[in-house]
């Protein structure tokens, strides 16, 4: 018994020293990471983790439900798609044709209204809000210096960084996009309760505006710029700019770093559903118009959907670009395989949400599942009802 008591005291002391060390070394965010992710058996963020964080509401207005296509759900998934949905844990697969729901199915206990984490699909919304801020005169142009809004980036190469550099992922900072390392800045940003402090500690190590380098920190900084420029919280600006005007059927949630600092995790973490996510794809497909009203500047939309850098044809301003089956697609894309994929000429939108994707080929590289979701959707569209 004495041995057990002594052992318990030693363990308590060691645990106390560990906690103290985490705070001394400014890695106390790992406590939250362990509690919310690792102790639950995950090695990275997961679809429903928004329930474990602080969130702010993005309200919806008057719902505008998608109409059902005349051929609504008259075909079933191909065998290849069924296997992929099972293997990779799909929770929603939706095909929209001519702005009508042509096919929809939900899996693993989720339904059409179920919320799940957008992950990096949120980046497209943030870029769109930048375009809205330019349209409304809060930001002068894509060429306005970040220094005008964030004083931490006014020295040396950082002074050359523009708002457009952030949207096109070319800030030149030392951000490290590592999802599975507990000590990476990506992990810190996900769990730290003072996200602005994390961002202001970044260093510009390469000349901005010269090359694409996928970095979630760029989008986070862009959100800080937008909030400073507009004087509005990102979740409120999303509500008034897009969520209500686009007739979303459900309110949504956007994770924030903490109640105290109340800064959205802009590079990720909007909790919504497949058909409401699809609305943003439709807005860009229709050149920024919704029900005849120009919600977003058409010239900005067009620029967003073209690569800024010839060496990186896969990315524009907040949107991924891919050629598949001889057609050009643009897409919102998130960690673990969250996609809104748009083919404007065919008037087709494909949405897939799920627990995982096909094996990674590297940061920023298209995984094979994207091609599969496109290919199988077109096979289904060509089937006779």
Image (cartoon, rainbow, N blue to C red):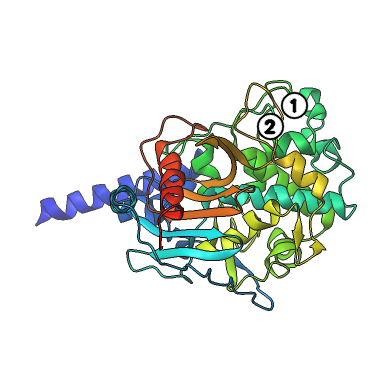
Task: Evaluate whether residue 3 shows in this view.
Answer: yes
User: Measuring 35% from the left and 64% from the top, which residue is drawn there?
Assistant: 107
Spot occupied by residue 42 in the image (x, y as percentages of width and height): 33, 50
Whichever of callouts 2 and 1 sits on the residue coming sooner in the sequence is 1
The N terminus lies in which quarter of the figure?
Answer: bottom left
| Residue in the foreground of this view, choosing between 16 and 258 | 258
Tags 2 and 1 touching, CB below 8 Å: no
Residue designated by label 1? 209
Classed neighbour count for the residue bearing mark 2: other residues with Cα under 10 Å, few (<14), some (14–19), many (≥20): some
Task: Evaluate whether residue 255 shows in this view.
Answer: no
Give the residue furthest to the front: 384
User: Measuring 74% from the left and 53% from the top, which residue is drawn there?
Assistant: 129
Which numbered disc, 2 or 1, marks the residue closer to the eye?
2
The C terminus lies in which quarter of the figure?
Answer: bottom left
Spot occupied by residue 184 in the image (x, y as percentages of width and height): 49, 35
What is the quadrant of residue 206 in the picture?
Answer: top right
Spot occupied by residue 226 in the image (x, y as percentages of width and height): 77, 50
Please state the total of marks drawn on the protein image.
2
Q: Does residue 144 appear to the left or right of 240 in the view shown? A: right
What is the quadrant of residue 205 in the picture?
Answer: top right
What is the quadrant of residue 361 in the picture?
Answer: top left
Classed neighbour count for the residue bearing mark 1: other residues with Cα under 10 Å, few (<14), some (14–19), many (≥20): many
Give the residue furthest to the left: 1
What label does residue 381 carry, if any?
none
For the residues labelled 2 and 1, the Cα–Cα distance comes to 13 Å
Q: Is residue 100 above or below residue 335?
A: below
Residue designated by label 2? 307
SS state under label 1? loop
| Residue in the foreground of this view, choosing between 137 and 327 | 327
Spot occupied by residue 257 in the image (x, y as percentages of width and height): 59, 55
SS state under label 2? loop
């Amino acid at each position: 018994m004495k041995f057990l008591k002594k052992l318990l005291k030693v363990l308590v002391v060691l645990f106390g020293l560990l906690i103290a060390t985490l705070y001394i070394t400014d890695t106390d965010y790992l406590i939250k990471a362990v509690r919310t992710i690792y102790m639950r058996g995950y090695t990275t963020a997961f679809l429903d983790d928004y329930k474990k964080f602080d969130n702010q509401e993005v309200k919806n207005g008057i719902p505008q439900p998608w109409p059902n296509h005349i051929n609504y759900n008259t075909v079933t998934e191909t065998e290849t798609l069924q296997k992929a949905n099972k293997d990779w844990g799909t929770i929603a697969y939706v095909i929209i044709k001519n702005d009508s729901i042509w096919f929809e199915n939900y899996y693993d206990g989720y339904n059409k209204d179920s919320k799940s984490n957008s992950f990096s699909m949120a980046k497209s919304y943030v870029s769109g809000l930048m375009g809205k801020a330019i349209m409304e005169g809060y930001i002068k142009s894509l060429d306005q210096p970040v220094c005008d809004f964030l004083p931490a980036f006014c020295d040396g190469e950082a002074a050359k960084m523009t708002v457009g550099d952030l949207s096109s992922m070319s800030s030149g900072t030392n951000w490290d996009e590592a999802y599975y390392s507990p000590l990476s800045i990506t992990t810190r940003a996900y769990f730290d309760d003072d996200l602005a402090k994390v961002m202001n500690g970044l260093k510009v190590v390469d000349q901005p505006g010269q090359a694409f380098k996928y970095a979630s920190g760029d989008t986070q900084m862009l959100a800080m710029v937008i909030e400073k420029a507009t004087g509005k919280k990102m979740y409120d600006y999303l509500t008034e700019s897009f969520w209500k005007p686009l007739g979303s059927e459900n309110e949504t949630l956007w994770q924030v770093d903490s109640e105290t600092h109340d800064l959205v995790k802009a590079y990720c973490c909007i909790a919504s559903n497949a058909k409401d996510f699809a609305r943003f794809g439709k807005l860009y497909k229709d050149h920024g118009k919704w029900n005849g009203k120009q919600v977003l500047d058409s010239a900005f939309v067009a620029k967003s959907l073209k690569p800024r850098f010839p060496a990186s044809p896969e990315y524009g301003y907040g949107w991924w670009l891919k050629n598949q089956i001889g057609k050009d697609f643009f897409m919102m894309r998130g960690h673990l395989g969250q996609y809104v994929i748009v083919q404007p000429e065919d008037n087709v939108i494909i949405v897939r949400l799920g627990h995982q994707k096909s094996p990674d080929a590297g940061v920023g590289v298209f995984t094979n599942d994207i091609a599969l979701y496109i290919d199988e959707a077109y096979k289904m569209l060509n089937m006779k009802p």
